[in-house]
Amino acid sequence: MCLVKSGDWVDYGGNNGFPVALDKALAARRDELTRVKVRGNLMPGPLQICECDPEMEHFVYHTWHCSAYERRLCDQGRAFFSPMVFRHEDWYYKQFLTVDVAMLCVSPMDKDGWFSLSGAMGSERFIVEQARHVILEVNEAMPYICGGPDVKVHISEADHVVEVGNRPLWSMALPAPTEADRKIASYILPQICDGATLQLGIGGTPNALGELIADSDLRDLGMHTELCSDGYLALYRAGKLTNRRKTLHPGKGVLSLAIGSRPLYDWLHENPDLLGLPLSYVNDPAVIAQNDNMISINACLHVDLYGQVGSESSGFRQISGTGGQLDFVEGAIRSKGGKAFLCMNSTFSDKTGQVHSRILPSLNSDIVTTPRSLTCYVVTEYGAVNLAGLSTWQRADALISIAHPDFREELIRAAERQRIWLPHHKR
């Protein structure tokens, strides 16, 4: 751990690649270090470097994508968000970023001296290549995911290796779908054909859709996703996920990250039918588009009457990150027969119980994740609309039609003020 010096940039592996023991050891050196900058993403927490130094005199933490824990740190001014698009993360490292020390949690080594980056294959390979020093933390619970050298680290590349035994992994249970989630999913299901390839985000709607697919007549679905969760395991167990008819990597389910249950990790472990690849490949729209009938399904927080989509912030408060939403929206709409769905409940309740519409006149201070020029299907429990090719008044009309009825008149008045409503259009 003495490899880390004051002023260094240190990179942690993301999600289950978080090096818990190494983080603790680095925090223990707090009083001898200053201005150490640390990067990570989707951390289950707690980060000891943050917990031991709330004033950030010794360590400053930066995240590419907020977990609930990292969101709280940002809320408290104790961490900082770094805007990014997942497919570009390796480009940032190659062209612009310094990595003095990389600390990654990996699977046990295979007979040829390779450690799998496991469910944190996004950009960790590029971090290793940029780093002056590499420290590996080996956790026996990490699944060994099949893939090439770009999702592995060789023993010869490590300055130090620390073994931590069998430490439980971050488990993210699928949320139970609500009635609204099931309604949203019911609008998407008819848009999926046999042999389609799916990218599913995490949330109630993908879970509800999985349940509907499991009970449907759909066959031979494929997987091409940045994040593999238990929804795919459920589809596999239902006999729906075969990858047979994929036009890219037929017979192989493609992933870059994995967070879920222990059964999911067991399914991933040494499974020859699954292929782990870095985000720079998996999330490249040109690659995604090579999957015919690519279906991308992601959640969002707000949509305005112009079709701008906010999926990562509430006002100035960072909730998550851009992640791969923009990648898969663009990739799916470039695919032959592909479709990109952005889903949300039509309303939400604040802490006081007041109900608000998620369809807004304009996003104002919300950060735009998907620009209006790329937004296609938007889905709420009141329907699905396709904004592709529509003018401003047509977009406003379509979106108001799937808003909660209690807010439609208010949205029409806003559209009139914004001059995106036909004066003679029927209400």
Image: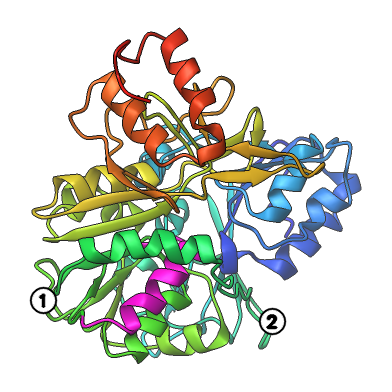
Q: Amino acid at mark 2?
A: Val
Quadrant assignment, res 110: bottom left
Residue shown at 40% from the left, 83% from the top: 233
Q: Position of residue 373 (x, y in %)?
A: 27, 27
Quadrant assignment, res 198: bottom left
* Residue 66 versus residue 225 in the image, above or below: above
- Seen from the viewer's position, the closer of residues 18 and 221 is 221
Residue shown at 83% from the left, 37% from the top: 56
Q: Position of residue 180 (x, y in %)?
A: 51, 60
Q: Is residue 82 left or right of residue 275?
A: right
Q: Which region shows up in magenta? A: 200-217
The disc label shown at residue 245, or none: 1
Residue shown at 58% from the left, 73% from the top: 176
| Quarter of the N terminus within the rendering | bottom right
Q: Which label lies toward us, 1 or 2?
A: 1
Q: CA distance from mark 1 to mark 2?
A: 41 Å
Q: Is disc 2 placed on a helix, strand or loop?
A: loop
Q: Amino acid at mark 1?
A: Arg
The disc label shown at residue 164, or none: 2
